[in-house]
Each structure stands twice: as structure tokens, then as C-alpha cells.
Amino acid sequence: MRERRRVAIGAGGAVVLLAALDAYVVTTILVPVVKDLDIPINRLERVTPVLTGFLLGYVAAMPLLGQLSDRFGRRPVLQACLVFFAVGSVVTALADGVPMLTAGRVVQGVAGGALLPVTMALAGDLWEERQRPVVLGAVGAAQELGSVLGPLYGAGVAAVADWRTIFWLNVPLVVAAMVAVQVAVPGGRREGPRPGVDVVGGLLLAVGLGLLVVGVHNPESEESALPPWGVPLLGAGAVVLVLFVVWEDRARTRLLDLSGVRRGALLATLGVSLLSGAALMVTLVDVVLVAQTVLHKDATDGALVLTRFLVALPVAAIVGGMVARRVGARWPMVAGMALAAVGYLLIASWPADLAGASYGPLPRMDVDLVVTGLGLGLVIAPVSSAVLGFVPAARHGVASASVVVARMMGMLLGISALSAWGFYRFHALTADLKPPLPFLMSDDEFDRQMKVYDAAVLDALRTEYQEIFWITAGLCVLGALLALGVGSRNRNLGRIRTSIPHTGPDSGKDSATDHVPIKGLGNILGKDG
């Protein structure tokens, strides 16, 4: 039994990693995708739905499909999601335009969004309470690993094959995962009454987020940052999300129930996760675009530039966890977001001759990206620790999923809003630029004017990226201020330490008497304990 449950959670962790890889894989292959689909490089706003479509499906589906797994069983839901993930991958690989590519990514996101909460719920089924946090930590690590390996995986495959190969490779990987799930994951339903499914809450969340994303997507961004339908849809999205909050407060079956929780501290922590997610996605996308459009690097070299940031991220995550264990979650979060803000200000001030800029013997680009990665990395473990400290151990899977949902929402809304602003600014900065016409002048004159034109376009790109990184730095400052509301030291820190199994007469008991219970919060995964 023990060996089988390890295989089961290993299979679950593998499918979580597969979905996480695909959440980030597109960031380093955007330029090859744009070229293959014949989209002008100065009209990158047309490919934004490819990024936001996956994230929207991922966030919207995660809570609702988690509940479905409690009603119908873990294995059937995992198998169904893997089938749809493969279908979405095939649609993406066959896409001949942005609409089809976006549709494939949305299907992938919806299917991938269920894999994390269902796997965490599986851990709750197979492990007793005192052992569960270690298992949940391993599943969460698979999710985090995707953010590091996804961009490198995408660039690596694109370096030796067409970008579509990335999505064709998903098919055999899904087949292998389905075999492992079928063999190892229990197929029956949990004993007891079947829990309800908050379909209304799930639909309200999905529609609200979808309206916000569509409201900021402007396929023709020459005139304004928002499309003509932007303000009405943003207003409608806000109204729907308010209705979602009202519904969750009154419904019997809820995606997220915060009754009995110190809401201010919990929401501040999730706010930090949301803002760090926005900053993370901006970095993954825009640093690669800087490398490919300003420094003229290919997809592989652009990903190698990003490795400075990606390597620093997990290193700082370990350090942040160690510091949080000693001093609590507040100060590592404050320090991490503040350090990230400094990093983005440094990136925003990159000079025109970036390749030759340095701090003494150290290349400036490398140092700035490492500083930024260290800052965001410091936040990862303290955010999770703080949220876990607000809930009893039986709800740690729910709490971990809520952190991921918040981060993904930040990635979704952050890249949507900042991309809309960035593309509008680029078109505004280049509105008066006219490319020279070769048949109206000599070859020498054309070459001279073409160099002037290219230099002006590069200046516009640098200005656009500079402003985006300034805004991102501001988001990190806001995150540092929010982190101050978490508390000087988590009163339930001893609770967090149960992530290391211990033995003793009370090892199986819930002895944290100052722990605030959360009635029904488990419904985000379709569980109450």
C-alpha cells in the first residue's frame, strides 16, 4: 500500500509538472511563433491571447474541477483532464493562426488547471494528517519547477526542431501519464455523502476573469491602450467578480469559504502572491523579448539570458524558507518584494549599449537579473508558509492551491494589462516613423536612412520596456507594503513546522490550540477535511 501510494502521488506530481511546463513554455518561443504565423514583429499584441488564454483556463478551472474530483473520484477526473490536455496540445500544434492557437491553449489551460488541486486532494486521501504537509510540499515543488524549466524546455526544443514539436511531444507524455494514473491512482469515490459542486461560483469566477482579460486586449493598439469595448467589459468584469464574492458569502457549497479566518492577513498574503505572479510573468516574457528584439538574439540565446533570473529564483526560495522558519513570514516577504523592486528599477535603466555595460568585472545584465530573481524567490516559501499558518493541517492542500491560484491570477491580469499598455506606448512612440523607400534614393542613402530608422525603432522598444519595468517595480513596492500586514511573526509557525514529520505521543494530534479553523475552505478542492 505504501509503495502504491508513492507511485500514485509520483504520477500526480508528474502531470502537475507537465501542466506547469506548458504554462511557461510559450514565453521563450513567442518570436518564432509570431514569425511562423506571419504576424509583424511590431504587432505582438495580436499574439497576447496565446499567453492569457492558457492562464485564464488554468485559473478558472482549478477550483471547480477540484470539486468535481471529490464527487466523481480522483482517477476519472485526472484521466479526463489528461485527454483534454492532449487534445489541446494537438490543436495548438496544428494551429495556422492566432484564433486556433489560442483555442488550443485555452483547452490546455482548462485541463491543466485541475491537475494541481486534484493531486493535492489525492495526497489528502492517501496520507494521514501529520505526514500530509511533506507530500503537499513535494507536489508544490513540481508546480514551482515548471516556472524554472518551462522557458528553458521551450527554447531547448525550439533550438533543434520546429516550435510545434513542443506540443506534439505532449501526446506521448500524456499517454505515459495516463497509464501511470490508471495503474497507481485509486479509482473509487471517497466514502460518505457526495459533496456539492459550486457550478455557479465557478462560472462567475471564469466569466469575471474572462471579461477583464478581453477588456484589456486591444488587437489594434495604435489609438489607445484599451479597445473601444475595454471600459464596458472591465466594468462588467468587476461587477461579476463582486457577484462572485456575494455568492461565495451566501452559498451553501462554496469554492472558497473564509469564515473564521483572519481575512486581512490572509488576503494581504494572497495579494503578495498575486503581485509576485504579475512580476514573474512580465519578467519571463519581456526579458526574452528584450533579448530577441533589442539584443537580436535567437530563441535559445534569449532563454539563456533568462537563466540568470531562473537560477536565482529557486536558490532564493530555499533561503526564504529558512529565514521564514526563524523570523516568520513577514520580513522575508517585505525584503523580497523590496529587492525585486530594486531589480526592476535597475532593469528599467539598462543603457543602449547593454552588452558592454558592467559593474566592474560583472556584466550588468547578469547582476540585475540575479538581483530580481533573488527578490522574487525570497517571497515563494514565506507566502506559502504564511497561508499554511492560517489554516489547520487538514486544509494545507487547499491553502497551497489558493497561493497558486493567486499567483496565476496575477500572471494573467499582469501580462494582460501591462502588455496592453506596452503595445500602445510602442505604437505611440513610432507613430511618426516612416521607413525609407529604396526606389526613391541611392543605395548608400537608403542604407543610411535605414540605420536611422532602425535606431529609432530600437529606442522606442527600449522606452516601452523601460516603462513596463517601472510599473512592475511599483507593483513590487505595493507587494512589500501588503506584506507588512501579514504580521510580525506567524503565531502558528509551530504549525508550519509540522511539514517535517515528527514522532512522539502527540504526533498524530492537532495540538495547535491557537489555530483558527476554516469551515468549508476545503470546498475549493471539494473537501472538508
Image (tube, rainbow, N blue to C red):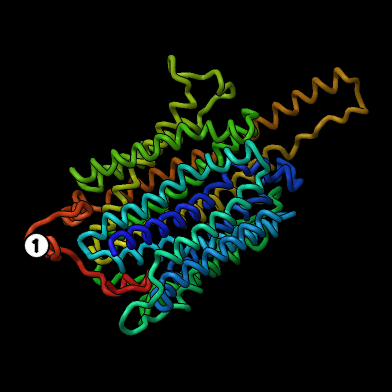
- Which quadrant holds residue 197? bottom left
| Residue 246 in sight here | no
Secondary structure state at the residue bearing disc 1: loop
Viewer-side residue, 259 vs 312: 312
Rendered view: 498 above or below 367: below
Residue 36, placed above or below residue 99: above
**For the residue marked with disc 1, what is the amino acid?**
Asp
Q: Quadrant of the C terminus?
A: bottom left
Residue 309: percent from the left, percent from the top?
45, 35
Instruction: Give me the residue at 63% from left, 30% from top.
Output: 297
Residue 353 seen by the camera: yes
Q: Quadrant of the N terminus?
A: bottom left
Q: Considering only vertical position in the picture, is 248 above or below 31?
A: below
- Residue placed furthest toward the top: 360
Say whether residue 355 is left or right of residue 509.
right
In the image: residue 382, left or right of residue 63 = left
The residue at 44%/63% (across/down) is 181
Count of number-bearing discs: 1
Indicate the position of residue 448 as horizontal and vertical percent values: 80, 20
The crowd level at tag 1 (other Cα within 10 Å; few <14, some 14-19, many 20+) is: few
Residue 141, percent from left and from top: 37, 49
Image x and y of residue 225, in percent: 63, 51
Is residue 322 positioned above or below 526 on the image? above
Report the residue marked by disc 1. 506
At a point 74% along the width and 43% down the height, the residue shown is 40
Q: Residue furthest right?
A: 439
Residue beneath the point at 31% across and 59% down: 3
Judged left or right of residue 390, residue 19 is right
Farthest residue toward the bottom? 193
Quarter where residue 501 is shown: bottom left
